[in-house]
């Protein structure tokens, strides 16, 4: 039986999207910290506090926290990784089913099923590609790891204990799973990912709407680099577009799609990601992650890969 809240939600969505009202609806704009934000009619009618909304977006930790929660929970994962050559032909694949055990700050991954083709591994079962190596560092713990927490505050300090490739992987995970924040120590990018700061705001268009997503009423917030950017301004853009669904009730990030690209002397990338969340008890966790990316990293060959992670059976 649907709740009263769900009935009201669907009524509002149907009412404001009815053909009779479409011609009457108009968007308006507000200026907040150098951001020109386009508002839908339903946002205007609900008298949404836009400055407060933007402040919550800037300070959001729920998206990153959801991934940190994976460090302390049991879960099962279906992992599908595919690598392509320059002509778009599949040259290596990995499909596996894994289960993570977690208890008292320790976790370990058990491989329940695995099918591999091509040169995904070398003779020592090390990954031949950067993409699955990065994926594995997020979802797999082949050796028992202890001292794990889901704390977000101060997590960036972990970089001080890492160097070389380990530090680079940690920075890239921060770039992927905490978009919109500055990335410490990442050459040529750094603050360019801080898209909510005043110096980056003029490079983007911002749109705010209300939309039902996965049965829950959400704020739909779209950030997109301006089409007319050229030269030095265009070179400052790393996050090309980011669409986020924030729960109206809890302000948690329930889903996010984003595209990032950049060219520098030592690396370039073009990446698209889709993330959907679910709740396991009091924990918000990712249930689906899709990635498509083209990378060229110094000392590594250019590689194009896709992966899909499907997570379920969470517990603690």
Image: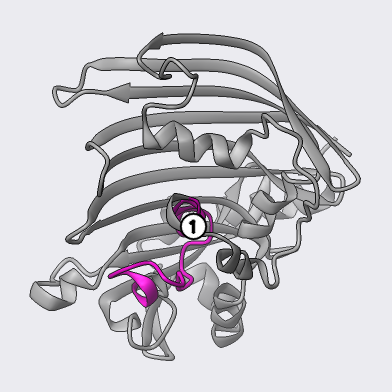
Q: Is residue 172 magenta?
A: yes
Q: Residue at x 28, y 16 (%)?
A: 90
Quadrant (top left, top right, bottom left, bottom right) of the N terminus? top right
Q: Which residues are magenta?
A: 166-192
145 relative position to 316: left or right: left
The quarter holding residue 279 reads top right
Q: Position of residue 61 (x, y in %)?
A: 65, 66
Q: Residue at x 38, y 88 (%)?
A: 198
Q: Position of residue 209 (x, y in %)?
A: 49, 64
Q: Which residue is mark 1?
A: 167
Count of residue discs = 1
Q: Residue at x 13, y 77 (%)?
A: 232
Front-lying residue, 148 or 292? 148
Front-lying residue, 237 or 71? 71
Q: Is residue 216 above or below residue 205?
A: above
Front-lying residue, 67 or 137? 137
Q: Residue at x 40, y 16 (%)?
A: 93
User: Residue lying furthest left in this view?
Assistant: 231
Say few, some or many: other residues with alpha carbon within 10 Å of mark 1 (under 14 / 14 to 19 / 20 or more). some
133 relative position to 217: left or right: left
Q: Is residue 260 above or below residue 286?
A: below
Q: Position of residue 55 (x, y in %)?
A: 58, 82
User: Residue lying furthest front in this view?
Assistant: 124
């Amino acid at each position: 039986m649907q709740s009263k809240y769900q009935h009201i939600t669907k009524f509002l969505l149907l009412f404001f999207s009815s053909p009779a009202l479409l011609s009457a609806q108009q968007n308006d704009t507000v200026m907040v910290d150098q951001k020109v934000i386009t508002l839908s009619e339903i946002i205007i009618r609900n008298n949404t506090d836009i400055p407060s909304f933007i402040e919550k977006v800037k300070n959001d930790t729920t998206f990153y926290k959801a991934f940190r929660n994976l460090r302390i929970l049991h879960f099962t994962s279906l992992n599908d990784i595919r690598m392509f050559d320059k002509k778009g032909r599949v040259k290596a694949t990995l499909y596996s089913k894994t289960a993570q055990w977690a208890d008292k700050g320790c976790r370990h991954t058990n491989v329940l099923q695995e099918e591999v083709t091509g040169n995904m591994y070398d003779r020592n079962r090390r990954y031949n590609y950067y993409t699955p190596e990065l994926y594995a560092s997020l979802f797999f713990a082949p050796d028992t790891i202890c001292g794990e927490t889901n704390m977000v505050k101060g997590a960036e300090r972990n970089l001080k204990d890492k160097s070389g490739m380990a530090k680079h992987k940690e920075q890239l995970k921060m770039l992927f799973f905490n978009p919109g924040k500055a990335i410490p120590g990442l050459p040529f990018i750094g603050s360019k990912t801080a898209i909510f700061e005043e110096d980056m705001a003029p490079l983007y268009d911002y749109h705010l709407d209300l939309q039902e997503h996965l049965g829950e009423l959400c704020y739909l917030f779209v950030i997109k680099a301006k089409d007319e950017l050229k030269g030095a301004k265009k070179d400052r853009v790393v996050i090309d577009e980011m669409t986020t669904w924030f729960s109206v009730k809890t302000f948690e990030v329930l889903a996010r799609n984003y595209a990032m690209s950049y060219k520098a002397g030592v690396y370039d990338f073009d990446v698209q990601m889709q993330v959907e969340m679910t709740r396991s008890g009091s924990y918000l966790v990712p249930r689906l992650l899709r990635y498509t990316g083209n990378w060229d990293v110094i000392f590594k060959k250019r590689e194009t890969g896709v992966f899909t992670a499907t997570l379920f059976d969470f517990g603690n």
